[in-house]
Image (spheres, grey):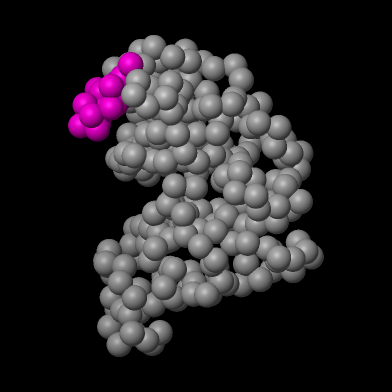
């Protein structure tokens, strides 16, 4: 019988919620579901129990629970549902519960929990100077220098940019986001794709260069995570590695070693 801890981690984002199960340090289950902006704890509980049933992991085997959310109104429903299903306190990532991570933020209560998780995951990997590019609804550049979170950059994500563009311009329709063969598009769809993808790549490369310049230290490791990262990875050389589970790793650490669990 395995004695490894079984950790359920939940990352509630603006568009998607990611749920993972770790056995020890290895992730054994991973789901990505749509975030519902309004949900009761009963609705959340139904989603959790359905996924756990599919996983084959016994509810009684779960030893730790961790939650990160950037949607404040969903924190309480998720905490209540997780505690009800697994009968254990939930460690919620925050500036109060970040395992002693130094935060160079005048008002750390405004810092997103997902960004704290990314910095914690960097620290766990032994990276003292690094940048996490988290490409989701928004794209955040989370900067760690000498093992301290010093800030970063937040820009609209690829999908958010497309959504606003099609909402505000009457003649522009939603397009699939596939890389066009060239920047100059000879039709509206390819022109939009080029603008979004090549434009985002240029923004990514410029901002990383500027951030590294301001950090004034080397080497600096750049990791990418988030739903849009894979789309960019093959078209730029400024990212050192892609880790789809980076944010979850930070949540796992708080789940296992945090203080003041909620129920």
Q: Is residue 182 left or right of residue 171?
A: right
Residue drawn where x is 66% and y is 26% of the image: 96
Q: In this view, does 47 lie to the left or right of 207?
A: left
**Residue 81 image offset from top left, x and y in percent:** 36, 18
Q: Can residue 195 be seen in this view?
A: no
**Residue 179 image offset from top left, x and y in percent:** 34, 75
Residue drawn where x is 51% and y is 62% of the image: 241
The answer to whether residue 250 is magenta is no
Residue drawn where x is 32% and y is 34% of the image: 36
**Residue 106 image offset from top left, x and y in percent:** 76, 39
> Toward the viewer: 127 or 25?
25
Q: Quadrant of residue 258?
A: top right
The answer to whether residue 48 is magenta is yes
Q: Give the range drawn in magenta.
A: 44-60
> Toward the viewer: 61 or 186?
61
Q: In which quarter of the image is residue 227?
A: bottom left
> Toward the viewer: 212 or 146?
146
Residue drawn where x is 65% and y is 50% of the image: 126
User: How many numbered discs sit on the rendered protein?
Assistant: 0
Q: In this view, does 170 lie to the left or right of 247?
A: left
Question: Vertical placement of 195 versus 184: above or below?
Answer: above
Q: Is residue 3 visible?
A: yes
**Residue 50 image offset from top left, x and y in percent:** 22, 27
* Magenta: main secondary structure: helix
């Amino acid at each position: 019988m395995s004695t490894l801890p079984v950790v359920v981690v939940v990352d509630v984002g603006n568009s998607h919620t990611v749920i993972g199960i770790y056995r020890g340090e290895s992730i054994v289950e991973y789901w990505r579901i749509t975030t519902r902006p309004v949900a009761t704890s009963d609705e959340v509980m139904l989603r959790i129990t359905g996924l756990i049933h599919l996983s084959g992991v016994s509810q009684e085997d779960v030893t730790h629970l961790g939650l990160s959310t950037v949607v404040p109104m969903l924190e309480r429903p998720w905490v209540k549902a997780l505690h009800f299903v697994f009968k254990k306190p939930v460690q919620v990532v925050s500036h109060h519960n970040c395992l002693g991570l130094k935060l160079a933020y005048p008002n750390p209560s405004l810092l997103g929990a997902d960004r704290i998780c990314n910095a914690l995951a960097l620290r766990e990997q032994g990276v003292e100077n690094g940048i996490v590019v988290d490409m989701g609804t928004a794209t955040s550049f989370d900067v760690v220098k000498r093992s301290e979170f010093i800030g970063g950059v937040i820009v609209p994500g690829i999908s958010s940019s497309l959504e606003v563009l099609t909402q505000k311009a009457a003649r522009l329709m939603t397009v699939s986001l596939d890389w066009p063969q060239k920047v100059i598009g000879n039709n509206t769809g390819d022109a939009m794709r080029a603008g979004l993808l090549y434009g985002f790549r240029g923004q990514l490369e410029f901002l990383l260069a500027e951030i590294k310049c301001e950090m004034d230290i080397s080497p600096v490791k750049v990791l990418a995570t988030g739903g849009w990262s894979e789309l960019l990875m093959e078209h730029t050389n400024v990212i050192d590695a892609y880790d789809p589970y980076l944010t979850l790793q930070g949540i796992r650490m708080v789940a296992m070693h945090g203080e003041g669990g909620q129920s």
